[in-house]
Image (spheres, grey):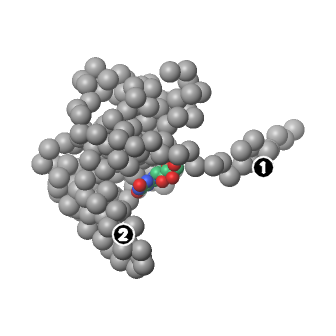
Amino acid sequence: MEFYDVVHRRRAVRRYRSDPVPKEALARIFDAANWAPSGMNKQQWEFLVVSGGKLAQMGDSYGKIAEGYTASWDDDKERQRFINFAKSFGGAPMLVVALAPASSNPAMRKMHLESVSAALENLLLAACAEGLGTCWMTGPLNDEPALRRILEVPEEKEFVAVTPLGYPAQEAPPPPRVDPDMSVKVRYLD
Ligand SMILES: Cc1cc2nc3c(=O)[nH]c(=O)nc-3n(C[C@H](O)[C@H](O)[C@H](O)COP(=O)(O)O)c2cc1C
């Protein structure tokens, strides 16, 4: 797929087929992540690939978060839809959890988070080029103690985001751009 097509076609996918992701595709996706720029060339990204019982436990954790988050929603059908999505991560066969080194120094922390975010965006775009779906998610991080327990992640690591990974079961429409021609958001100064 041509680069700009990939950029435009990547969507937050919230319904997946259960088909497994081929190992070769996974290797190419992580290779793309590995070629991101990084602060001090530390290449400080780490990824956990989660499936099976651990994925189910993460679904239990995110399901509880979703129940709390939607408690005040009036539309019960919409609420149930969101909770069901959360419990199964949309039926994805696997999740990728992105980790950065933790740092008490705000500048270093920012550098680590940005480096891992760059790698994660590469991963999302590569997955799209492979015909796979993803959804950058920080909602599941709201119960961090549960995630640390389930995934055995020590305090020296910071959670950056989670994405399901799998073949899309649904095409989401592209959300319109706030500033389609970037005439407001880009300013040329000289
Ligand atoms: C930092 C960040 C956090 C996000 N957290 C969530 C999340 O917790 N749950 C979710 O369903 N989507 C989440 N999203 C996905 C956004 O909702 C989605 O990217 C946005 O609506 C635009 O849609 P698109 O990705 O299809 O262009 C997150 C995206 C980003 C970049």
Which amino acid is tagged 1?
Val
Give the x, y percent position of residue 171.
45, 42
Residue 77: which disc?
A: 2
Label 2: few (<14), some or many (≥20) within 10 Å? few
Give the x, y percent position of residue 57.
17, 55
Q: Residue at x 17, y 52 (%)?
A: 56
Residue 184: which disc?
A: 1
SS state under label 1: loop
Q: Is residue 132 above or below residue 80?
A: above
Can residue 167 be seen from the camera position used here?
yes
Judging depth in this view, the residue of 158 and 21 nearest the camera is 21
Give the x, y percent position of residue 158.
34, 51
Give the x, y percent position of residue 110.
49, 49
Q: Residue at x 55, y 33 (%)?
A: 7
- Image check: 58 left or right of 30? left
Asked if the residues shown at circle 1 and circle 2 are in contact, with their CB atoms under 8 angstroms apart, the answer is no
Q: Residue at x 35, y 47 (%)?
A: 15
Which amino acid is tagged 2?
Lys
